Amino acid sequence: MRTLALAIGLVAAQSAHAAEPLNVVATFSILGDMTQNVGGDRVHVTTLVGPGGDLHVFNPTPRQAGVLAEADAVVMNGLALEGWLERLVEATGYDGPVIAAAHDVTPLPAGDDDEDADGGHQEAAHHHHHGVYDPHAWQDLSNAVLYVDAIAEGLSAADPEGAETYRANADAYIAKLTALDAEAKADMATIPEDGRTVLTNHDAFAYFGKAYGVTFIAPQGISTEAEPSAQDVAALVRQIREDGVDALFLESVADNRLVEQIAAETGVTIGGELYSDALSGPDGDGSTYLSMMRHNLGVLVKALGKGV
Amino acid sequence: MDQLLGPFGEFAFMRRALVGCIAVSMGATPVGVFLLLRRMSLTGDAMAHAILPGAAIGFLFAGLSLTAMTIGGLVAGMTVAVAAGAVSRSTVLREDASLAAFYLVSLAAGVAVVSMHGSNVDLMHVLFGSVLALGNDALILLCAIATITMIALALLYRPLVLECLDPAYLRGVSGLSAVAHFAFLALAVLNLVGGFHALGTLMAVGIMILPAATARFWTRGVGAMIGIAFAVAVTGSIAGLWLSYQYGLPSGPAIVLALGGFYGLSLVFGAEGSLLARHTPRSHREA
């Protein structure tokens, strides 16, 4: 009798989802991929900031606002990454659940890299960023597990019938994340600890650095908009010479010409491209969150290994 | 002295920035002097805005590619310059009005193209320039533009000076008037496109116009004005880069502000028609 009830329940659930999948809006490509993995074919995911786009300067189109207004659930990062989302939600009149994926993450303070870069201004930098967190928590695979849990819980609340499916999908996905996390730690351990200093022109990698023991230095602050002064660049060139930076990495969003010049100036080699805020297009090396993390890890280990 | 030269000796990017600025100064300042003499100083600003959609379209097709953005900027700038020049020569509308009309349309198209693309971060770097990030390609381009400009100006010098002084006379005696006019507009566009690699679209006009305006306060001769403007541009570039190094100012604006400082000083103390010169008895100047 019980099995029969369960079977009927399953059939009902399947027919329900076949009729209309849950419409979920994710704020950017990485969350979109995670949500798709958890939701499977019970959900239809729309991503607001697509692959290669920049989160910091997002302007919604009326079409996207329309999709949001009719969504069943919204997945966002939180930690003040999507400053525009609250206004957009208000403007569109969307009143469904908003899932903050980074809700359970232990956040790092913003601007940590600045302190490494300039010891003299440590106090000032700390004071300036007080109370503001670095939002790029997905760069640590163990945080991604928390993201996936939060997304699975949120989707289950929005669509209780699918709770079991979401949990099962999440567990399968988490197994892959944990495996890659272990692989990352093992791979990074092959590189001596004093040979893991990396320069990249976007400081989105504080969580990655903390998790896998890599020091990241950035020529520009957390914003991609400020124009550097000659003083900033000179300080950085000196720092690369003095601190023995091992590799330079260009990042897929910001201006690369400056890093190319600094590489030429200091003789440090350029390692490759790291993905920070956005996945690549479907044909790129980072079309899913897992392949993105695998790509980042691969190019880092390769470039740092060369320097030894 | 050591403190002044220190950064240029220690850092290659400072030397590159300086070479880039000198190259831009060589081409842009004579063009600026002729713009000033022809009362077309604001034309430079209008042109800089007209270049934006071309650079934006080049960027959309090829990313942050020097060649694509240069060609795009040249095509857009030339189209606006030629169209505005043609309208002013064949209709009732004067050059300033027709240019304003074309550059506004072009600017609007540029903003629309940029917005449609969604991510405009790279373009922000184009608009605000990166004199600290001049690669070999960019330096070669700047030097090539300076060379072309010097040769072209040497050939066009007489008709240009004549047209500044008496355009009707030149139009009467020679068919060269139109040729000189359009060739000159082409040079202006070329130098603005070069300048936007070094200083950004918005700042490129500064190194073209400010030294010329400064030089006007010291001499009346065209040749001397070009010489002084070039010297002012180079000195201002060095001062701006040094300020940027010493006080952490963004480098493009620092250079233009330094040029503005020279302009302000000349405005007050210059030998020709400055505030001081106009209010000093004539005998003083002739003594």
Image (cartoon, coloured by chain):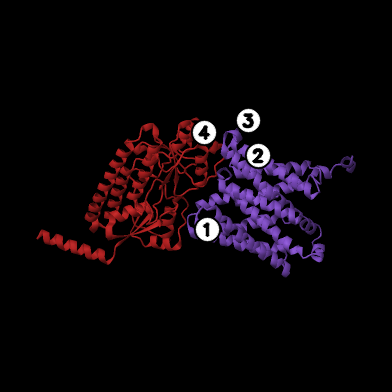
Chain colours: A red, B purple
Q: Give SS at disc 2.
A: helix
Judge if badges 3 and 2 mark residues of a common chain.
yes
Question: Quick check: B101 left or right of A211?
Answer: right
Q: Work out how far the residue at label 4 is from the one at label 3, CA to CA, in angstroms.
A: 16 Å
Amino acid type at image mark 2: Ile
Residue ID for mark 2: B238
Decide: few, some or many residues near mark 4? Use Cα within 10 Å; few <14, some 14-19, many ≥20. some
Q: Nearer the viewer, mark 2 or mark 1?
A: 2
Does the rendering let one see residue B257? yes
Residue A39: image location, x then y, percent: 28, 56
Q: Give SS at disc 1.
A: helix
Residue ID for mark 4: A238
Which label belongs to residue B38?
Answer: none
Q: Work out how far the residue at label 3 is from the one at label 2, CA to CA, in angstroms.
A: 13 Å
Residue ID for mark 3: B3
Q: Give SS at disc 4.
A: helix
Q: Quick one: quadrant of the C terminus of chain B?
A: top right
Q: State which chain disc 2 sits on.
A: B
Does the rendering let one see residue A130? no
Q: State which chain disc 4 sits on.
A: A
Decide: few, some or many residues near mark 2? Use Cα within 10 Å; few <14, some 14-19, many ≥20. many
Q: Quick one: quadrant of the N terminus of chain B?
A: top right
